[in-house]
Amino acid sequence: MHIRSGHMVGHDAIQAKGWFGAHKWLLLRRLSQVFFLGLFLVGPLTGYWLVKGNLASSLTLDFLPLTDPYVLAQSFVARHIPELTAILGAVIVVGAYFVVGGRVYCSWVCPLNPVTDLAHWIRQKLGFKGGARFSRNVRYWLLAMTFAVAAISGTIAWELVNPVSMLHRGIIFGFGIGWLVVLAVFLFDLFVSNRGWCGHLCPVGSFYSLIGKVSVVRVSAAGRSKCNDCMDCYAVCPEPQVIQPALKGTAPTSSPLILSANCTNCGRCVDVCAPDVFSFSTRFAGQSDQAVPNSQHQIGEARP
């Protein structure tokens, strides 16, 4: 748990729900990350290949193709003609993330997420403050640059330096220089910029956020009238700027749904909220609570 101004973040939730109740979604995320990584490790370790390939392109049980749509898009831009199975695999992945949320990839699948989460946890424990700040739009500029490089070079150049791919390949096939790249991301988040890589720079996350703009599963602040302004949700959220419109009714529709494309559906706000303001819902759900009256204290947009 984080400590902020003498207050242990999530303490009230632990008291109300118990330790496991206040960490349920975090634990499920870690199990999910281990599960997806384990699918790829079974083959090299046992010789029984449940999944062949890597996160960029894989074949499950010699039947189900899955393709990273970001990699496929770069392939098209680089003027490569992918096989039909690769296109089908990308369609399946896009369809899945259309339902659960594009940036679910970042919080539930990406093997780099525990590394950056660890850097954030250590940073909080050591009391590091400040650091470099980047506009969250930088990641979209970097996304555009990866496509520009692919178009100019005729190669999927980003995959050669993508920390996510390097970490995944390294765990499965053995590390080379990949360790240095992953270490660089860890040290960057620890010493240079709080949640800098995933929250401000990573083009992979920015690509999946484009799918997340229209996804079905959403976090809802349906119980927002019960909010006690403890700020714990802001403290644990990797994208705290997405909370304000739903929690305080500042969006044009006053919907309690977190509709931002950059919400990762990680569930940490659900975990640490003692009054159970947050829950998982769908974008089609109605409003359960009215907006918080303007006379109540309004929390300004939290900075990461």
Image (cartoon, rainbow, N blue to C red):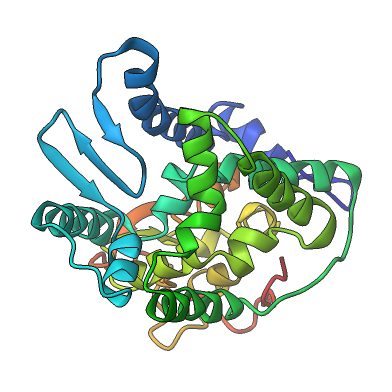
Who is closer to the viewer here, 178 or 226?
Answer: 178
Locate the N terminus and report the quarter of the image it occupies: top right
> Which image quadrant for residue 252?
bottom left
> Which image quadrant for residue 98?
bottom left
Who is closer to the viewer here, 194 or 170?
Answer: 170
**Percent coordinates x, y for residue 192 in the rendering:** 82, 61
Who is closer to the viewer here, 148 or 143?
Answer: 148
Tell me, yes or no, if residue 289 can be seen here: no
Please name the residue shown 71% across and 56% down the image: 230
Please name the residue shown 46% across and 57% down the image: 159
**Side of 17 relative to 194 (left or right):** left
> Which image quadrant for residue 214?
bottom left
**Side of 254 relative to 86 (left or right):** right
Please name the residue shown 71% across and 76% down the image: 134
- Residue that lies at the very extreme toward the bottom in this rendered image: 252
**Percent coordinates x, y for residue 121 in the rendering:** 74, 42
- Vertical relation: 108 (above or below) 173: below
Locate the C terminus and report the quarter of the image it occupies: bottom right
